[in-house]
Amino acid sequence: MSWEEVRRQKSPCPCGRGFILKITTENDWFQTDETSDLECTFCEAKNAAIAKAGRPYRERAAALQARARSEAEKRFLPSFLGRLDGKNKKQIWAEIFSKNSYPSLGTFYQHVSSSGLENYLRSYFQSKFEHSFPNEYRDEAIDALLREATENIAQAEKAEGAVE
């Protein structure tokens, strides 16, 4: 399977001093991929300054989210796993995923067979506790960490906006 360039397009960058180069490639099955490259030293410097202004806040937010996830794992993962203990895979899927369109039962079986049931459930817990899990797997301390992380993200956006 080879990828061939099918389109190369230059357009002006936001400041008008350089350009953005978009290259579209396609393979034998008509799958496409598009890459963009900014060719403007002024815009590149501006983007770097914007990223630098927000970086400390975003790093702090990431650390807070990781701490909240770790605390949730210590406090609530055992009860989450315990709630599912003794159930077969189909019952577990029905309890957790049947209201969602993803994963289907077959996909769930594939995921579990490749990583193991407990690893899959741990991974699910880690990825979903912040937004999707009911309050039974959160407490005030975890919510405070998540609120502070959200505030740091807002500060990052404000700092980045001030550079523009």
Image (cartoon, rainbow, N blue to C red):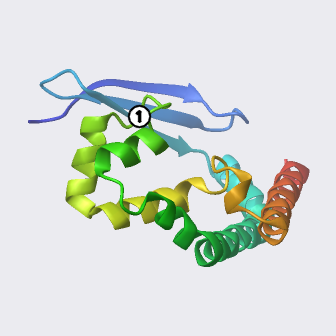
Q: Residues within 10 Å of mark 1 (few under 14, many from 20)?
A: few
Drawn side of residue 153 relative to residue 48, left or right? right
In what quadrant of the picture does the N terminus appear?
A: top left
Q: Secondary structure at mark 1?
A: loop
Residue at horizontal 64 percent and vertical 34 percent from the top: 13
Residue 11 sits in which quadrant?
top right
Residue 159 horizontal/vertical position (percent): 87, 57
Q: What residue is disc 1 on?
A: 102
Residue 132 horizontal/vertical position (percent): 63, 46
Drawn side of residue 39 relative to residue 156, left or right? left
Amino acid found under the numbered disc labelled 1? Tyr
Taking the view exactly as shown, the residue that stands out farthest to the left is: 1
Residue 160 horizontal/vertical position (percent): 82, 54
User: In front: 83, or 9?
Assistant: 83
Q: How many marks?
A: 1
User: In front: 87, or 45?
Assistant: 87
Residue 87 horizontal/vertical position (percent): 36, 54
Residue at horizontal 62 percent and vertical 57 percent from the top: 129
Residue 53 sits in which quadrant?
bottom right
Vertical position of residue 36 compared to residue 132: above or below = above
Drawn side of residue 127 relative to residue 130, left or right? left
